[in-house]
Amino acid sequence: MSNASIALNRFGYGLRRGERGPDDPVRDLLDQFDRYDPRPAALDGREDTSHKAGEFIRTIREQRRKRQDYLRSGSPDSEGPTMGSATPDSAMRDTTQREELPPELRRALVSGRGAFREDVALRTRIAVNSDAPMIERLVHFWSNHFSVSIGKVGTMHQVGNHEFTAIRPHVLGTFGDMLKAATLHPAMLLYLDQFRSTGPNSQFIRRRRNSARGPRGLNENLAREILELHTIGVDGGYSQSDVTEFARALTGWTIAGLPMTERFSDPQPGGAVFIRVAHEPGLRTIMGRSYRDNGPQQAMAILDDLAAHPSTARFIAKKLARHFAGDEPPQSLVANLERDFLRSGGDLASLTRTLIEAPEVWNAEPAKFRQPFEWLVSVMRFAGIDNLGSRRIVGALNEIGQVPWRAPSPAGYDDLSGSWAGPDALFRRVELAERIARNVPSDDILNRAETAFPGSLSDNTRTWLSRAESNAQALGLLLVAPEMMRR
Amino acid sequence: MTPNAFDRRTMLTGSLALGATGLAMPQIAFAKSAGSKNLLLVVLRGAADGLAMLAPLGDPDFARTRSAALADYETARRADSFFSIHPAFEQVGIAYAEGDALFVHAASTAYRERSHFDGQNMLETGGSTPYAKRDGWLNRLVGAMPATKSGVPPKALAIAPTVPLALRGDAPASSYAPSALPQASDDFLDRVSRLYAADEQLGGLWMKALETQEMAADDGLRNLRDAKAVGELAASLMRESNGARIGMVELGGWDTHAGQRNAFNRQARQLDTLLGAYRSAMGSAWSSTLVLVATEFGRTVRFNGTGGTDHGTAGAAIVMGGAIRGGRVIADWPGLGDGDLHEGRDLRPTTALESVLAGATAEHFGLDPAELMASLFPGRSSTPLTGFARG
């Protein structure tokens, strides 16, 4: 790969139809810092629904009750859905028998899915139309690092919002700010069960001990995943007791608008609230450091320390290097990024600049197999598709195996080639490529291919493109050519 | 409480042929050919709760620690005088009664922390620590199996959109999931073949993709959410003599941190439907099929504050097949008393899951258990368990 092709494809989302490649690849990448728009016009119509998380859940519960009542009257053995279930896609499965429902209940049921679909399409279109595709790649990298996923009640409305309001503003800011915004966002509080975690010795529990309402108490899920996946990493030097202590410090942080807690709510930036009566009182000790009980600030102070921890620098450096320089990134690159992270205090603009300027990332051999989302965005940019409907975008992503915010675990989507380069996965891309190629203008493919992969198109690809029986077939072949599959 | 609750340890140990004993028996000959035997591995992602799957009702501490879930077992099938099978497992229960299924309890891999990702990494790679090995043990099993009559390695296939870690490695393996996309034209497929011929990676993947497409033609299935269809699809790709010998299916959704009773019930039903459909669709090939169902670790004994359970240690596994000696539970029961628990919160592991996986697999394919254990799960001190097969 030439340097121009590396800038376009390894760092970015490929060339957009009608544009030409950069003359000065490094300069062009650095210029994207200024071109990047954290709140592009496409998001204008997208309301920030962070503070409405509880309201949505109440509405969903209400709708479910009505639906159950309705179904119960007709079919006595229908099974009611459960709240807060840990089952992925359970929200989707709840739609069985929905054909039998009256129209107004049916509409209400699918509203969450509609909101999710529009957000996936928005994210895709922003990337397809972006003048700063490398920074969009970083948005998606960090969004996957702080992965939230649908499946639990209320998350459909929040997962896109998480990226739009907690990730986008911080990709060139500091890691610590992003960590706090991403962690204490309703999407994360819902996804990792934090919203219902309550201090065992909090006023809330002590008063309700004999109440008939269901059991409530500590849930360690968010605390564990922050340590293991978001900051210091599994070998970062924490123990089970650190997890429990952190979980205690996080109690009180929840979403706005939950029944019965409204009057105790202390709204926080980002749409979350802090409920003091649910907070576990007392001093917390995590990895040998003590944190006094100053309410919502206790968890904030811990997050600040985690963001600055040397293990975090190492963990982030490796992960970022792997994303751009290959599954087994050169140790010198990892060390360089780690030093930058520590020296700059987690300044992500500085870290990104160091990445761009590192010689190890400019290796001419392709470093990675494109993930499905990367591939589809690159295909859409190359083919000049900017008017694809939301259903089609989500449908295509679903078929090729990677819908944003639907990762199977809190670790997000895996970033190793072996996870994506499978026979069936390849076959689906080929099926989709032929379909796309039949439906878009496909003139001058060979020249466009030379421009999109400057100085990097192989003779083999050139030969088979030129032998294609039609422009559409040449386009289809280019969309699955090795140059398009790897970056 | 059953009177024999405290004799459990002795009873169960006596009922199973330990690996060491098996190895000492000179009459066991290890066949040179895997023939037409099949293995299906089902990985339950998210840490399935073994205590919910197979409830130790005979342990007096179960009623104490799991009182909120006791009602689930009122009408449950009794595995024996001590354990009851979760009522969602209807098909598995029938197989159990017919001697085609058994449970292993209080089992875990050598992993002792509580991260799903590390736990699954060890369950799938077989490494002695997370990330110690890059390839999967199921893939190494493919490598250890003798080539078929025509000289090619036995086929290995995951019913999944991509090849899961357990099946990744040097031996050829592929994945298949039904697609809702319009079929590509034959001419286009043919040209892609030529485009990829010069590319080692894409060319290899492409050949496998075409092979699988041929086998699964007209499956009529639109997605992998339909458990019955998945079971039938797996069977259709495995039951013929030119089909896959090694299959793998993944089932997520077991991370029941909240509202466990409903969530577990729903997942268990899915698993049960899948296994039942697979068993029946395998037809006569079921008699030469082994099914192993495993998860990365178990869950806490006590319910947490949100009606769920958190990440634990030991759990349960299921072994099924037409040639196994089923209808029994293999467990060296550690007890659920406060002092019995691992780190005061988890079911204590007394059986190495690796010994079960390696032992059952070796016996099924006629491979040497000790050698297979060393290559699939290196660095373990436990010996492979045998005695799964009817003999």
Image: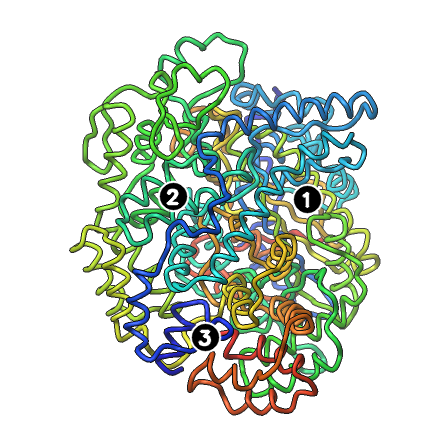
Q: Single out the mark in the foreground, 2 or 1.
A: 2
Instruction: Determine which residue is flagged by label 1.
Output: B271
Do the CB atoms of the residues marked 1 and 3 lie less than 8 Å apart?
A: no
Instruction: Determine which residue is flagged by label 3.
Output: A19
Q: Give the image quarter of residue A84.
A: top right
Q: Give the distance between the C-alpha atoms of the residues marked 1 and 3, in whole angstroms.
A: 51 Å
Q: Is residue B348 visible?
A: no
Q: Chain of mark 3?
A: A
Residue A400 position (above or below residue A84) = below
Q: Given the image, on which type of amino acid does mark 2 rest? A: Ala
Percent from the top left, x then y, of residue B184? 72, 73
| Residue pictured at 40% horizontal, 36% vertical | A185
Percent from the top left, x then y, of residue A361? 32, 73
Q: Residue furthest left?
A: A343
Position of the C terminus of chain B, as image quadrant, is: bottom right
Q: Given the image, on which type of amino acid does mark 3 rest? A: Glu
Q: Given the image, on which type of amino acid does mark 1 rest? A: Leu
In terms of secondary structure, where does tag 1 sit?
helix
In terms of depth relative to the viewer, which is nearer, B74 or A318?
A: A318
In terms of depth relative to the viewer, which is nearer, B187 or A410?
A: B187
Q: Residues within 10 Å of mark 2 (few under 14, many from 20)?
A: many
Indicate which disc, 3 or 2, sits on the residue closer to the N terminus.
3
| Residue pictured at 80% horizontal, 59% vertical | B220
